[in-house]
Amino acid sequence: MKRSIHFLAAAALIVAAASCSSVGKMAELADNVNVKCTPAVLEAVAGTVPADVTVTYPKNYFHPKAILEVVPVIVYEGGEVAATPLMYQGEKVKDNYKPVAKSGGIVNEKIVFPFKPGMEQSHMELRGTVRYKAKTYTLPVKKVADGVNTTYMLVDADGSLPLKADGYQAIIKQTEEGQILYNVNSAEVRSGQINGQSIKNFQKALDEIGSNARKTLVGTEVVAYASPEGGEKLNQKLSDNRSKSADKAWDKVMKNRDIADPEVKSVGQDWEGFQELVQNSDIEDKDLIIRVLSMYSDPAVRESEIRNMSSVFTDLKKSVLPELRRARFIANVEYKNYTTDELLALVDDNVDVLDEPALLHSATLVKDLKSKVKLYQKAIDKYNSDAARFNLGATYLDNGDIENAKKAFSNVKRKDADLENALGVIALREGDLETAYSHFKKSGTNTAKRNMGVVDILSGDYAKAVKDIKDTKGCCKLIGLANLLNGDLEASAKSMHCNDADCNYIRAIIAARQGNATDVKKYLDLVAKDDPELAARAEKDVEFAEFR
């Protein structure tokens, strides 16, 4: 009996030893385990690094009573990041880990790492530990992928927020006018008209143009009209005759002035002037008259309908029609506005002479934030400028001051599409992509649609980015990048028209993916010439790993 007990004990020890030995062989035979990672070169997506890992365990590899812990790790210069451990158990283990049969099996895992700067040059490895009772065995480290591709990070993650147009013009087109009036059905110029106040004012304006270094007379016109009553054919002839008599009168008006001959025109019936005078008059039924003009385009029908309103037509004959029997003397002038240097000098010495457009424009010329804020505030205080309120917010935002930007935008009176885009940019920079996208979609401007594409790229939805920005104009880099990330190299190459460093970098990536070493070098050389910082990125970019 005792002998039997000793035999059984010995047998148990042999079985236990054999079990421990086979568990240890899981480490010894680890090379027999096949591991495949997709993608083989990891890619950053939306601030993470995802990986699909498929592990094939061969028959008789996994011990029925073993527990295997696998820790995925990305190792990079200066650190490493471990993902959540993956736990597996043999088929006789009574736990809640993923089981693997002794007969073998395939397991699929989706692993996600947070992206860390420095991962551009890295690799992913699996570190395994087998446990059986009190025994622990360390498996050989298995490298499964390289990484990390960060091409999506080429997107301008701040979004775009253009300033409101300042309306400043380097050259301002102006006109000076005088006019002579005719009697009904007459083309004779009366002497009182040539010597009238309108012509005197015109002559004075011409003299001022000649003495003003900022003003240049670029052309003159004589334009004759007839009031719209009495028939279209008759009035056209009357207008033609008035243009001839006015041309002769021009010579008298321009006496002793060195001014080129005018361009002479005959308009005929002056319906445009008629509508303007009626609109600005105190005639009781002026809205009815304007409605008639909009309903009928035929001059004869218009005149007939208006004549049918007898009381109205009486008023027109007194206050409107006499003003349309005329010839206009027109001087076309170009006014040379302040230059950049002059504006900057006035900002320092005499800012009060600047009008609203000049203040807004000057704010774009000064360099420091304090000066910009001062000029925008001046435009707000002096002109109640809503454009200045908006541009103040955009300027704060451009300088990274989100809180002051929010305050400035809250004071903007006109809640338009540009403001919606601005609110979207704020949300984007605060990392709230959902709110940002909502504002951009509501805005609907060309810039906002491009910003929608930025959100799509940051969210990892590259196909949606291509869709959102396909009809937008400008920013070929963004369109090229979206197509590149979506895997359409041809569309990416065709969409880019700029020759700056950003676009040449994308062209280099396209060439690398096509295996074109010559173009990779060509475009990266251009990048190095224009943007040293981007060139330094290329040195570590996994996109060019095969071309170094």
Image (tube, grey):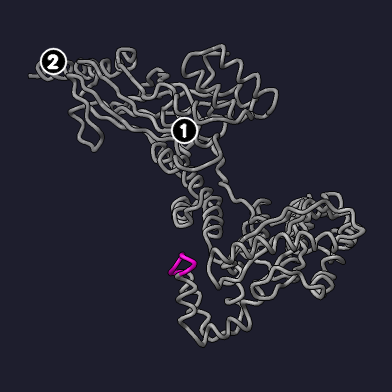
**Where is residue 87 shown, x and y percent of the image?**
31, 32
Observer able to see residue 384:
yes
**Where is residue 105 shown, x and y percent of the image?**
21, 22
Which is nearer the N-term, disc 1 or disc 2? 2
In the image, taking residue 428 as reference, residue 408 lies left or right, namely: right
Observer able to see residue 344:
no
Disc 1 versus disc 2: distance between alpha carbons? 61 Å
Is disc 2 surrounded by few (<14), some (14 to 19) or many (20+) residues within 10 Å? Answer: few
* 295 is within the stretch colored magenta: yes
Towards the viewer: 183 or 524: 183
Answer yes or no: do the residues labelled 1 and 2 have beta carbons within 8 Å? Answer: no
Towards the viewer: 332 or 163: 332
For the point 68% across and 67% down, which residue is it? 385
In the image, taking residue 255 as reference, residue 299 lies left or right, namely: left
Compared with 72, 312 (above or below) is: below
The quadrant where residue 108 appears: top left
Label 1 secondary element: loop
For the point 47% across and 53% down, which residue is it? 444
Q: Which residue is mark 2?
A: 7
**Where is residue 311 shown, x and y percent of the image?**
51, 88
Compared with 252, 286 (above or below) is: below
Towards the viewer: 240 or 83: 240
The quadrant where residue 64 appears: top left
Compared with 399, 198 (above or below) is: below
Q: Which residue is mark 1?
A: 44
The quadrant where residue 346 appears: bottom right
What kind of residue is marked 2?
Answer: Phe
Q: Which residues are magenta?
A: 294-300
What kind of residue is marked 1?
Answer: Ala
